[in-house]
Image: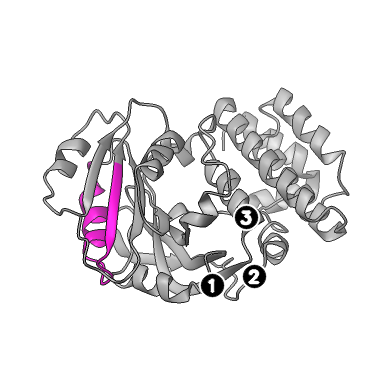
Amino acid sequence: MEKDYKEPLISICIPAYNAEKYINQTMDCLLNQTYRNLELIVVDDGSTDKTLSILKSYSDTRLAVLQNPRKNAASARNHSFLNSAGKYIVFFDADDWIPNDFIECQLKCIKSENDIVAANWGRFYRDDLSSFKSDPNVVQVNLTYEEWILAYWHTAAHITPPGRLFFSRKLVEQTPLWDESLTLNDDFQFFNELFFHCDRIIYSNSDFYYRSGIEGLSSKKSEFFYLSNYYSLKRGIELALLKYPNSENIKICCANMWQNLKYQIYPSYTKLIDRVDEELAKLPSPNFKFPAGGITKILNLLFGWKLTTTLKHWLKV
């Protein structure tokens, strides 16, 4: 590790599992950052492909490769963080990408150890960086936690890829680490813990590239994974209601988040639907409409969202 920098050390914490197709591109974009005082703590989470051998082929002293028995991404992220030393932290996935000045720009935006910097972000598909398109839901101003909820949860547009956020070690140490019981949407739980304690969320116009169109954990559709989603939402929503117990608008946003999950799982998982309904009963009526386009929109207008969803479920479309 290089020791003679005056700038603060930044730790980039990366879980990696069977990432051989993309790990080179991710490592290269991080090691080629204009900001040099970095450490990359990559935890191989029991890969069965060439991920580990690719990582070990790098000779950069800023890269540390650790191994973790196959658990999950949350466990690997915790292991990475606990072996890091940076004043500032970035959690990064093993298949995403950033431009060379990204970390430098994030650091310039942060003014306090109680701040979080949220970059602009969007998706690119497979290996085609030119396919990048910014997410249309990004709010391009600084926000408090309350404003973040009102902006993003009202339409359940809460997706926040880990590498988009930049924050201090001090802030992480005030919160629980990643919940290792979660397998899907674990970032929602963790980032809401951070947001709960931060002073403000600062917008940065640097672009974070989130790789899509590949088979990954977020593509899993099963009751087991949706149950993880449920528990992550429950924790995040509890934090929001604890922070703003008297805000009717916050409560409606929380109800909209539950309603969105119900749209996703109806009619497949009746026991989980019952749990969601129990949460909805504690809140004002949601006003988030069933998202639909094309023929689904027509069916929804004719028959309502429940029958439309049931028909699509039967027809497997």
Q: Secondary structure at mark 1?
A: strand
Quadrant in the picture for residue 12:
bottom left
Residue that numbered label 3 is attached to: 294
Position of residue 159 measured from the top left corner of the image (x, y, whole percent): 56, 54
Q: Amino acid at mark 3?
A: Gly
Quadrant in the picture for residue 17:
top left
Number of numbered discs: 3
Q: Quadrant location of the N terminus?
A: bottom left
Q: Which mark is residue 203?
A: 1
Residue 32 within the segment the image draws in magenta: yes
Instruction: Judge the density around disc 1: few (<14), some (14-19), many (≥20) Cα neighbours within 10 Å.
Output: many
Q: Which mark is residue 51?
A: none
> Which stretch is magenta?
20-42
Residue that numbered label 2 is attached to: 143
The one nearer the camera, 304 or 95, is 95
Q: Secondary structure at mark 3?
A: helix
Instruction: Judge the density around disc 3: few (<14), some (14-19), many (≥20) Cα neighbours within 10 Å.
Output: few
Q: Amino acid at mark 1?
A: Tyr
Instruction: Judge the density around disc 2: few (<14), some (14-19), many (≥20) Cα neighbours within 10 Å.
Output: some
- In the picture, measured across the screen, residue 2 lies left or right of residue 254, that is left
Residue 237 within the segment the image draws in magenta: no
The one nearer the camera, 212 or 59, is 59
Q: Amino acid at mark 2?
A: Leu
Kindly report the distance in space between the C-alpha atoms of the residues bearing marks 2 and 1.
Answer: 8 Å
Position of residue 227 measured from the top left corner of the image (x, y, whole percent): 62, 30
Earlier along the polypeptide chain: callout 2 or callout 1? 2
